[in-house]
Image (cartoon, coloured by chain):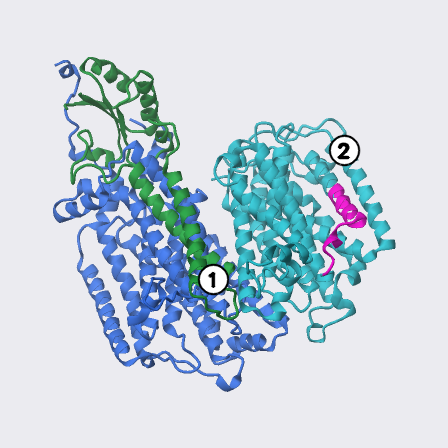
Amino acid sequence: MSGAYLDRANPRPLPLRGLIAAGALFAAGALCFLYGLVTNPAAAWRAFHVNHLYFAGIAQGGLLLACILTIVGARWAGPVRRIAESLAAWLPITFLLALVELAGARHIYPWIDEPLPWKIAWLNLPRLALTDLTIFAALALTGFFFLRASLRPALAGAQWPQGGFGERAAGWWLGGFGGSEAERAAALRTTRILAPIICLLFAFGYTLIGFDQVMSLSPTWFSNLFGGFFAWGCFLSSISVTALLSVLHRNSPGLAGQITPARLHDLGKMIFAFSIFWMYLFFSQYLVIWYGNLPEETSFFRDRLGTEFLMSTWYWEGWWSRIMDEPWVKVSLFAWLCVWVIPFWCLLGQRPKRSAAWLASVAAISAFGFWIERNVLVWPSLVPGDTWAFLGVVQVGTALGFLGAFSAVWLLTTRIFPTLPVPQSAE
Amino acid sequence: MPALVGIYDAPGPVAECARRLRGRGFTRLEIYAPAAFPELDTALDEKPSKVRIWTLIGGLLGVTTGYAMTIWMSYDWPVTIGGKPFASIPTYTIIGFELTILFGGLATLLGLLVVGRLPYGRFGKNDRAYSARFSAEEFGLVVECRERDVQEVDALLRDHQAKEVSLVEP
Amino acid sequence: MPAMSLAGAMRPADPPGADSQVNRDLLRVMEGISPGYLLLLAATVLSVVAAGGVWIWQVYLGLGVGGYAHPIFWGVYIVTFVFWVGIAHAGTLISAILYLFRAKWRNAINRSAEAMTVFAVLTAAQFLGIHVGRIWKSYFILPYPNQRGLWVNFRSPLEWDTFAISTYATISIVFFFIGLLPDIAIARDRARGLRKLLYTALALGWQGTARQWKSHSRAVLHLSGLATPLVLSVHSVVSWDFAMSIVPGWHATIFAPYFVAGAIFSGFAMVLTVMIPVRRIYGLEAYITDYHFENMTRFLLLTSWIVGYAYGFEYFVAWYSGVEAEQTAFWLRAFGPYWFSTWTMVFCNVIAPQLFWFKRLRTHVPTIFVVSTLINIGMWFERYVIIITSLGREYDPAVWGIYTPTWAELTIFAGSFGFFAMLFLLFMKLFPVIAISEVKELVIHERAHSGEAH
């Protein structure tokens, strides 16, 4: 069975209308960001930071899912794997954005202007730039080699319309790859070698990114689970996006009939189980800090969940006003609702997981919830008193710009790299 | 009523044959299998197993008990410990969770016994058609029918790859 | 009678050849008692008796018999408790989580792993009794209505432990029993004498009817769904026994997932350590194959990395935090009086399993046996490091202390292995060590698909 393919590649024309819409969104977003740079650079750079992290997580999580499927030799996923892989096209851009972001580092990291003498060895800009750029670069490079090995065999069989952009791009991607049995076996081997390496790089790299780019925003706060919690959020948000895109494109040429209820069921199970695990990680962190009640640790939760969820409270009287009146609590609870409560209760049981519309709605809510969550992780550390700091023309505009750019890259990728053929596992 | 026992080697034909028999109005059927096979789950009865309701009720009962017990006991004799509130919801979540699992699991066991009709039979006595072959690797399809239908059922069983068919007297 | 016209119309007797190869192979493990077996059983019973004697002596004299002295009042007993609770995690993982993930390679090992879970929980639970000062008051931990009108303190992690461990013991026994039910019926149909009586009673009249299998599959599915979060919660709760305090080195948010990963790691290693000799002695090579070893060792590699990740980031954040007590605690772990335990732990848990990157070694049985044994040792030392070094080096250097286990503690520690081994030895002769009906599921499935049906 080795090297057998379900079908030949099925390239599609570029979706011009979608691309134009995404491009327009990007242009509008870029304008908002530039306007922000002039009027309110702090807000602009912070919004940039949040969205950079959010989309980097989605891109990286998709690659991680593909790697895990490779390691366990899972056959259930089929073309879902291609959708997850195509998210990773954003990875090189992630590296560039991290580079660009250094220009606004002063607005993002409070310890640049007010350094902590006892932490200066770690919290300084050259060290941060070196570490995080290395991580983004390493992940982009390993991701590139993984995708090259994973996509080449499928691309080799593609029937392209003569001389189009797609054919040129595919030819460049293929290099000298002819699609022989030996070449395919070598490609499969490469993916198998790279997959565990990427998983390890992700685990350690994104933990450090979480520490550097989020935890250090409250420089005195620390929690050794935080990096893992952050990385898990990246992975889960990416699964939600994969599920959403699988459903949205279930009727596209090449995918028709492939997004079966069984596959949706498996994706639904993943969102369900992984959101429970997300909740577990959150609870593990919260409980230890709540119970220990040490001021250097509780500050993080006080800024986000207010006093209701801290030491002196959990009393009946006045809980509503503690939730509604204190800064950020509403937003945090809304994120929690989207990321855990809704996925848990709406995906309980078999039927909802197998319904395309239902699953897509829950996945969309979860993905949006993670955008809110990323905001809640970043903003309250910088502006603890201002609940709505993450909303505004500049902030929302920047987010939409990212969304436009990400969508454009994704649309291009899925058209150049055919979505359907997935190698059957050799075993 | 006499009963016919068809012996099979695979679950697929058993399920098919059972469906055919049901279609022809034979409802007193029984299947013996050496292991669990999804195709047999719907052969006699399409509805999903009722065990699910037992688990659900057990779990809900557990979570309610967990929170109610801890909160009530904390207020029944209020003692401030470590400056924590009497109803320390985060910690009571742990008790609530454990009892959800405990009650849910025990209810599932009970559900298995009730829905699967266990314990079954008198001590040491099995059904008249049961044979140790069914705890080896063979499948049995048992049809109770009137004497005049015996021929028809026999033919049907053999049509579906029964390797032996035998008659069990009442 | 028209029926007489049917060819071969007879009551389906039990022809001697009607038994299957799988039944014979796997039931054979339960037959015959060799001198070696008896010797081993005698040794384990003896160690349990010795431990029991020491324990009675300890109850009489007090916990000073152990090495408990200021400031360390959690010693080998608690270390061993955590160790056994950890071992108990593999069974549920294999049975529940891998069941949900439809990993077929669990089939050959799930029964013995479930048995180990039950026995390990029973072993672990005893250490709570051994550890407390006044065993005759241990029932105070239960919330029962009493004359004093007092209730237990539900805010205490030790109380959570009571609920978590007893829930885990109950559910793992239920899971074990439900899985065994069809196999007991197989044994019942083939046993004679006293065994027949026992299996008839335990099989509850199981005949493998469609209705029974249908409810059985449902029940297993639901129990898997319940047991999966349970397995996460149990070792999390155990970890919170430590993390809820503000002792440096204990008060860490990462503890819960880190302990769970460690538990699964050690449990898998124990399954391998036990099953490799059993496979060899009873000739089960056809059932526990390279395929199983390949997957088990990959799993060890994965969990080893999670544990290594936790070690690394614990140290990193202790340093990053800028809290002097944390920094000192971790420095002393590596370079203080207990450096030996720490480096043993790192070597056994992080370095040794890296051998499994090599495909050849993943199926090389002697290597697997050695590494899995090392992992068991390393995981015991991990708990030793966490508990002893942190307690011995709290905030105030004036109350720092050193702990050395006494022979009484070590006897009871050894007795716990004897107890576990004793139960497993008895189990091997009473119940099938491999889930027969699940193996058959695969055998019949494969036969049907290879068109070999006759």
Q: Is C310 left or right of A95, judged from the image as shown?
A: left
Chain A is which colour?
Answer: cyan
Going by the numbered disc 1, the residue's amino acid type is Phe
Which residue is depicted at the point 64% across and 74% down?
Answer: C322
Residue C103: x %, y % from top left: 43, 44
Q: Secondary structure at mark 1?
A: helix
Above or below, A6 against B73 in this view is: above
Above or below, B135 against C98 in this view is: above
The chain under label 2 reads A
Q: Secondary structure at mark 2?
A: helix
Chain B is which colour?
Answer: green
In front here: C259 or B108?
Answer: B108
State the residue position of label 1: C259
Residue A109 among magenta residues: no
Q: Is B117 left or right of A125, judged from the image as shown?
A: left
The crowding category of the residue bearing disc 2, from other C-alpha atoms within 10 Å (few below 14, some 14 to 19, many at least 20), is some
Q: Is A125 left or right of A424, judged from the image as shown?
A: right
Label at residue C308: none
Q: Which segment is the magenta one?
A: A385-405
Asked whether residue A150 appears in the rendered view, the answer is no
In front here: A106 or B80?
Answer: B80
The chain under label 1 reads C
Residue C227: x %, y % from top left: 41, 50
Query: In whole angstroms, how far apart are the C-alphas of marks 1 and 2?
Result: 53 Å
Which residue is depicted at the point 25% across and 58% down?
Answer: C425
Asked whether residue C144 appears in the rendered view, the answer is yes
Label at residue A165: 2
